[in-house]
Amino acid sequence: MRRRWPCMSEPARMPDGLRARERNGPLDTVMQNTTTREFTCLQRRELERFGERLGRFGVNFAAVDARGQIAVLLNAGQFESDTQQLLEAARQVIEAEPKEPDCSPHEGVWQFAEDHLLLAIALRLPPTAAGWRGVAGTVLLDLGRVDDQPHPREAVCGDESSPVQTRMAYFTEMLQLLAEKFQMMVRSDEQMLKVGTELSQVYEELVLLHKISMNMSVTESDTNFLQLACDSLTEIVLVEGIAVLLERATEGGGKYMVAAGSGLIDLDHDMAAMLHSRLAEQLNRGQEALLDSDVGTPWLYEWPKGVRNIIAVPLYAREQGESQSGSHAGHGASIIGFMVAVNHTAKSDFDSTDIKLFTSVASGCAVFIENGRLFRDLKELFVGSLKALTSSIDAKDQYTRGHSERVALISRWLGERLAEQEPMDEEQIHRLYLTGLLHDIGKIGVEERVLCKNGKLTQEEWECIKHHPTTGAGILRDIKQMQDIVPGVLCHHERIDGKGYPAGLKGDEIPLEGRIIGLADSFDAMTSKRVYRNALTIDHALDQIRKGLGTQFDARIGEVFLNSDIDRLWDLIQGAEPSMYGPAQMADYGTAAVGTLLR
Amino acid sequence: MTGNRVLIADDEIHIIHVVAIKLRNNGFEVIAANNGAEAYELACSEHPDIIVTDYQMPFVTGIELIEKLRANEETKHTPAILLTARSFAISDEMQETLGVEACLSKPFSPKELLKTIQDILHEKAMALHV
């Protein structure tokens, strides 16, 4: 089936006889254009259809729009209509229509009998509550030349039972029906348009909520997300200003701070506190939102100058252990913030649809914030558990206490420095931290006797130690979330010159993480005490690294490390385990060969 | 504005409803098709100024429709907008190869579609002017 809805912007030309048109379009909802005052496509199509049916009785049909132009002219084929006479008749009909809303219009069908015998009726727009709305145009029937009519004069004022009179009565009735039908059509068109506009608005809202929920899955910052919500909302609800305020724990109780917003909205601390207390009051009264204006009812509250209407909706989060203020009874939830908008510019007041929309968006925001918090908690728990695990391994040997965490910090430091020169995202840097933390996890399989041995290791013991990267990788490989850190753990004892272990990889064969962790591990090992030697000074350790560039260490990564602010790094790792580096303990142990550094 | 005839092809009737209302209210003439084959026929007979087509349609998909349009001398240069499902990401190169002016993922905002159409037609009018 074919569908089309053509719209002619130029006045219709005179058609050659009747035309059958096969247009059908249920979707044509455009209203009469009040500025150009033309018929809409649908209206014209209906008029044409009507005219075609009347044409079977040998009369010509014309429709003149409110501008006074012929929109439809259907020639039944028996005679030609005089367009001048049609236009003049239409002008007279329209002129007789009232111009003021409260006048009653001329009723009924007009007759003209100048040259042709014409019947005409005004097509009125359906009246609204405000009253009379004027006309959309005129419909005319041309019955032919007056002289050709069987008994024209009698027909106008004579015997009602004559065939001519019956014919006239029939056409008159038809025109009245058409005028009624036209009004009904316009009314349903208007309703259709209203429904259509609402549908379109609902669609925009749907898109907005969809956009918000899609963005929720992205690890976006709270501020960015809230800003997106505000911006998207103002695209479909025309307001002067909108903002999201969140509770920030400050001294002396909670305070609401603007987290995101757009437009003109003046929110100082007093206004924020006032909004919060008024919103809480409304919620306690069982309202969903705070809605205030002087439209219909007087103001509920007094607002600063310039506020014409206002809406505020709460952001709820599940009740926490350390309960915040603003607890909302019955919800098991507390208010963590609210969304406020002022001065709807398209309407005089916010209404229930706005409450619905704002509430949906606000609950999206609340869920996002809540998820972010849970995500951070989870991450903290995860890293915390890893730290507990690795420090228990480090603790097998008193000299390696805190080692894993320091290597993690140094690796992250190196990652951050590298990121200044080449693309490396936050995810990768965090991965370096985790890899550093877990790099020695394989030592769980090495006996304490071997790890803590003070003296030369036997070949067998040395093999056992050398196995720890493989053991570590083996442990982690089975954990889905740890896949990404396996290469770094496996290769942190490889050397650029291929003399490392376990695989003896060379140069770029060693994954980047392996090269970074290797360097970080060595630096921390050198600057820490060992059972077999004292800690090296920082400068000494840096010298050793410099000497090892291109053989033990990756030259590029090494350079980046050597050029970085080592003092700051030192403070950083000192902070992690300050008690380990007391100068008093430095002298207790004899120096040891650097060659056994990588034990 | 000259050049305001839009052909929309989508098998989901509600999409046509929403788009038609939005566009008509903004002075466009809208022709609609329920599937790709019908859309192609209308594109050839009605000479729309711009075509908006869904990606997933029965019989002839949006992509096939655009390929057919591009192969036809008459409809070769008619700008086209592709509506896609969120899960179906179309690359810039693919957009280029196909000759698609813009790509909107569903659910799209009718407002955004209107703006995209206006921008494309405006650009086209400017190009013709120069």
Image (spheres, rainbow, N blue to C red):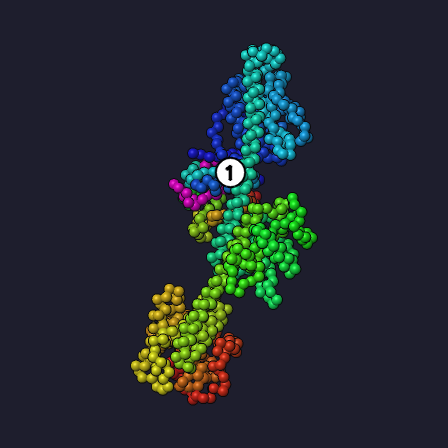
Question: How far across and down, in percent of the image, does residue A32 sit?
Answer: 58, 34
Q: Is residue B26 above or below residue A516?
A: above
Three-letter residue code for mark 1? Val
Q: Is residue A423 above or below residue A150?
A: below
Q: Which residue was labeled with disc 1?
A: B30
**Residue A163 or A389: which is nearer the viewer?**
A389
Residue drawn 56% across and 30% down? A184
Q: Is residue B54 magenta?
A: yes
Range of magenta residues: B42-62
**Residue A397 visible, this orientation:** yes
- Name the foreground residue: A522 vs A171: A171
| Left or right placement of residue A272 versus residue A319 in this view | right
Task: Give percent across and percent down for residue A437.
Answer: 43, 72
Q: Position of residue A555 (x, y in %)?
A: 44, 75
User: Label 1's element?
Assistant: strand
Tell me, yes or no, if residue A554 can be seen here.
Answer: no
Name the quarter where the C terminus of chain A is drawn: bottom left
